[in-house]
Amino acid sequence: MADSSRRNGRLSLGKRLRRCPSFRCLGVHPNWDDYGGEEKRAIRSAETIHYPSRLYEELFRAAGKSVFPGNYYAFMGNKIRQTQLFQLLGVPHPRTGIYYGKEREERILADFSFPLVAKTPVGSSQGRGVWRIGDRGTLRAYLSAHNPAYVQEYLPIDRDLRVVLLAGRVVHAYWRIAPPGDFRNNVSCGGRISFDRIPEAALDFARWVAARCRFDEVGLDLCLHDGRWWVLEANMAYGLEGFRRRGLDVHEIFRELDEGGWL
């Protein structure tokens, strides 16, 4: 149990931690002057701000404060940044190319063969903005609507494993199994959830990835291919249907982590 002296002693702007006894959640206001005088003093004196929002994260960092979760807003919904981070840190990730400018079709086909996967690189989620491309015509249609182009090798898998980690701890994991006739495993696209036989090796890999990338809150999509685990994507705004199917409440999980001293 968290020490009583910690109760409401730490600040969060976002409401993610609203059930956590040691946090005071102020809300995200669009203008600095929307905060009251005492709230401003509390923010100025805090060493760490939790869930500062996209609006304030860089402002607080510029002022010398720490923020939690780390590597969160900058990578939220941005596949280009995620891929670059995975490549920089040597995290196993499907071979991926990002293509700008002219002659992209020729450069892509010099690097990849059909079929390949193309995605909307920023802002897509829930399986939207993902295509399995098998010919030049479909590739040209994708390129006409996307600059830059985000292209990945196609891995012939029928499922992936969603692993959610908070403060370095695995709090939930489940398979997402593609529906017949679709290569996407997303639950929002009809993918089936299964809790059967979650490999401990995959959970160990997820812990390593989260620590390596300094992701304090993340839903990692993993797949097993050619005998090894790969990271497909990192999700900061992950869906909660898998939690509901298991009878879990993510806010209660945060509360338990807080009371256990993990946050």
Image (tube, grey):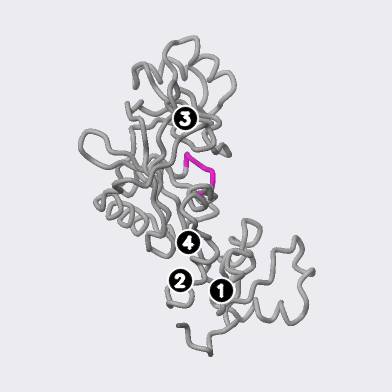
Residue positioned 30% across, 53% down in the render: 203
Callout 2 crowding tier (Cα within 10 Å): few <14, some 14–19, many ≥20? some
Q: Position of residue 74 (x, y in %)?
A: 53, 52
Residue in the image at 27% along x and 55% along y: 204
- Amino acid type, callout 3: Tyr
Please name the residue that numbered disc 1 is placed on.
20
Mark seen at residue 70: 4
Q: Please state if 106 lies on the left or on the right of 42 as rendered.
A: left
The amino acid sitting under disc 4 is: Gly
The residue type indicated by label 2 comes to Leu
Q: Mark 3 sits on what residue?
A: 150
Question: In terms of secondary structure, where does tag 1 sit?
Answer: loop
Say above or below: 64 vs 3: above
Disc nearer the start of the sequence (2/4):
4
Above or below, 232 against 118 in this view is below
Earlier residue among tags 2 and 1:
1
Query: What residue range appears in magenta?
Result: 75-80
Residue wearing tag 2: 257
The Cα–Cα distance between marks 2 and 3, rounded to whole angstroms, is: 37 Å
Label 3, label 4: how many angstroms apart (C-alpha)?
Answer: 25 Å
Classed neighbour count for the residue bearing mark 1: other residues with Cα under 10 Å, few (<14), some (14–19), many (≥20): many
- Distance from disc 2 to disc 4, alpha carbons, whole Å, reads 17 Å
